[in-house]
Amino acid sequence: MPVMRFIAHVDMDAFYASVELLRYPELRGKPLVIGGRRRAAQESGAFPTLREYKGRGVITTATYEARAFGVNSGMALMRAAKRAPDALLLPADFDEYRRYSRLFKEAVRAIAPEIEDRGIDEIYVDLTSLVPAGDWAQAKELARSIQDAVREATGLSCSIGIAPNKLLAKLASELDKPGGLTVLTEADIPERVWPLPVRKINGVGPKAAARLEALGIRTVGELARADPALLVERFGEKHGAWMHDAANGRDERPVITHSEPKSISRETTFEDDLHPVRDREALTRIFTELCARVAGDLERKGYAGRTIGLKLRYDNFRTLTRDCTLEAPTRDAAAIRRAAGECLKRVPLERRIRLLGVRVGSLSKSSA
């Protein structure tokens, strides 16, 4: 008989915005959007609103007060300005967000070390070895101690979902945000999961949801009751079967506590397209900064790499990549810059540039 698992999904609440509110507590309770790059405005004491924004940046995150106006992560700032023109706008500070990310993960790991890192603001935690079999109350108390530890270490709140598997745990963490602590057992699925729209299942995107709606399937419950053969016919054997399993709360994926990265990269999308000749100085500076940041990431994570890659996107959205392979692995910023510069010589520089990126692949562990 399979062992009953206790899997927690820890999701920081409006993470980037919450970090900014620690810095600017006077903005608490106000609609606030994080996006863009320049920090000069708020340093002078003035907080611009979305109505003043001109550019093509996107929202990184927003406070719950801003989300009430229908703005959310990934939305273009210009579009958001039409919905919430008086929302305040702060640019992102990823160095600070990464620092708080490390703090919250260290706080969790001190209590429950079996962690799967899923990004800067979320992790899965396997609590199975720490909780007596079938004791959901004990699992909830352990999750509460994790919440308290995260708040003590960072001053930030998180929402935690506890369930028998990763799929249900992630769903549970979203049910009672912010600051939620939700237990979701298999017995709770009909009442708490099946009424939800199919998009709530992590892995069902807008296109799949539209195709399901065309079949008359709008809720998770309708998907769970659908004919598996129909789903396989319309979505393929693997994806169709997965959708039916997911709707019924079945997920056997383990919590993966360690995985080796295949590459490490940095890229930036410019607020305004840059011309390779007229804006050469700015492009050179940004290019060098990207290489330095990749080198810093490699050093922090203990890797070096032999394959240096360049990514370029023009103003017509055409994207080119070029790479070269070095004789020996490196994590030296100057060496990465030289190799990426050689890649740059192999791309046409006749159009304005929208995005620039640098990648290091063929990674190996380095103690140098």
Image (tube, helix red, strand yellow):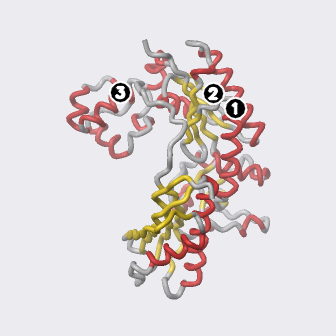
Amino acid on which disc 3 is placed: Asp
**Residue beneath the point at 52% across and 67% down:** 269
Q: Nearer the viewer, residue 288 or 260?
A: 260
Q: Earlier in the sequence, mark 2 or mark 3?
A: 2
Q: Nearer the viewer, residue 210 or 81?
A: 210
Q: Quadrant of the N terminus?
A: top left
**How far is the residue under mark 2 from the one under mark 1?**
9 Å
Q: Are marks 3 and 1 in contact (CB under 8 Å)?
A: no
Q: Earlier in the sequence, mark 3 or mark 1?
A: 1
Q: Are marks 2 and 1 in contact (CB under 8 Å)?
A: yes
Q: Quadrant of residue 189?
A: top left
Q: Nearer the viewer, residue 298 or 111?
A: 298
Q: Count residues near mark 2 (Cα–Cα under 10 Å), then give few for <14, some for 14-19, many for 20+.
A: many
Amino acid on which disc 1 is placed: Gln
**How far from the left and from the top, in percent, is residue 197?**
42, 34
Q: Quadrant of residue 52?
A: bottom right
Q: Quadrant of residue 304?
A: bottom right
Q: What residue is pinned by disc 3?
A: 245
Instruction: Judge from the rendering whether residue 238 lies leftward or rightward of residue 39; answer left or right.
Output: left
Q: What residue is pinned by disc 1?
A: 147
**Residue beneath the point at 28% across and 35% down:** 238
Give the mark toward the camera: 2 or 1.
1
Q: Is residue 160 above or below residue 309?
A: above
Secondary element at tag 1: helix
Q: Is residue 28 above or below residue 258?
A: below
